[in-house]
Image (cartoon, rainbow, N blue to C red):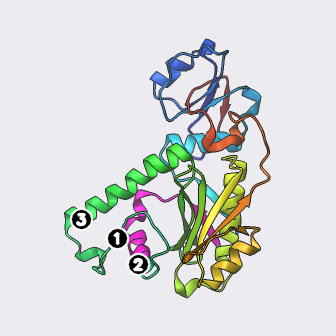
Amino acid sequence: MEDGGRVLVLSPEEGMIAHMARGECVIGVRSGNDMPPLPGGCYLVDEEESVDAAFADRVYARFRHKPWKIGENDTFLLREFSADDIERLYLLEQEMQAYPAVSGILGELTDTPWAELPRDRREALTGTLSSYIEHQYAFYEYGLWGICLKSEDRLIGMCGFSVTEEGEPSLGYYISPSYRGRGIATQCCRMALDFVETWVQAEEVSAQIDRENFASLCIVRSLGFVEMKGDGQCLEFRKTLAGDKTDPESPEAGALWEKILSAAGKQFRR
């Protein structure tokens, strides 16, 4: 790993429980149906050979509470939010108040600048973001992600998925007005869709678009979403993902993996 850490891949017979008790990052290998009790927030696979470096990197990042990189190109990076993003996220979501159809993470905000907010309010908003990171990302392995412009090291928007009442991913995004018209939203949506198809093994996703938001309507249609019947202000779209129908406990199964952080035998270093 980048900081010299390691990920162990072990079965119960190889002492994974003891390694976990010592606070080591472990990926567990299933050993029959009689698995011992294991802590939550961990990952379990069926075969040691199914764990590659990319999967180990993601497990280690989650173990160290580091944001996952969802995708990138020469212009921008799509990644999970971190607690350090709170001030920039606050400014971004203040912009989003003008677009009520777009939901964020922090909830309803005022026009008060971040620096002028009472300390307890800033702490509460920071707590909201931290809770989102801890629960949304760790449980579902997906959520709303930050779009960072590389040339300015600036948070310029968000893209990702919320969870519907039916428990499926619903695509959404927001780009600051001054950065629109560059194709960023479409590229980010493609990265987001690739991620949930490959890592989460989602079979279908939805999107709700305001019927007067012609730019967004063009984007979802270009991405292969199909409009469903509806007569409200928001139109519903759905997209079926090809999905590699692998065992839901393989590394590629992402958020639907049975969660167990275990350890051993095979180590990954950088």
Q: Label 3 is placed on what type of residue?
A: Arg
Return the x and y of residue 209 as percentages of the image width and height. Answer: 59, 74
Please identify the quarter of the rendering in which residue 190 is found: bottom right
Regarding residue 203, the answer to whether it shows in the image is: yes
Q: Label 1 is placed on what type of residue?
A: Glu
Mark 2 surroundings within 10 Å by alpha-carbon count, few (fewer than 14), some (14 through 19), many (20 or more): some
Q: N-terminal of the two: label 1 or label 2?
A: 2
Q: Which residue is mark 2?
A: 97
- The residue under the point 56% across, 50% down is 166
Residue 108 shows which numbered tag?
Answer: 1
In the image, the segment drawn in magenta is 76-93
- The residue under the point 66% across, 16% down is 31
Q: Is residue 88 magenta?
A: yes
Regarding residue 74, the answer to whether it shows in the image is: no
The residues bearing labels 2 and 3 have C-alpha atoms spaced at a distance of 18 Å
Q: N-terminal of the two: label 2 or label 3?
A: 2
Q: Which residue is mark 3?
A: 121
Q: N-terminal of the two: label 3 or label 1?
A: 1
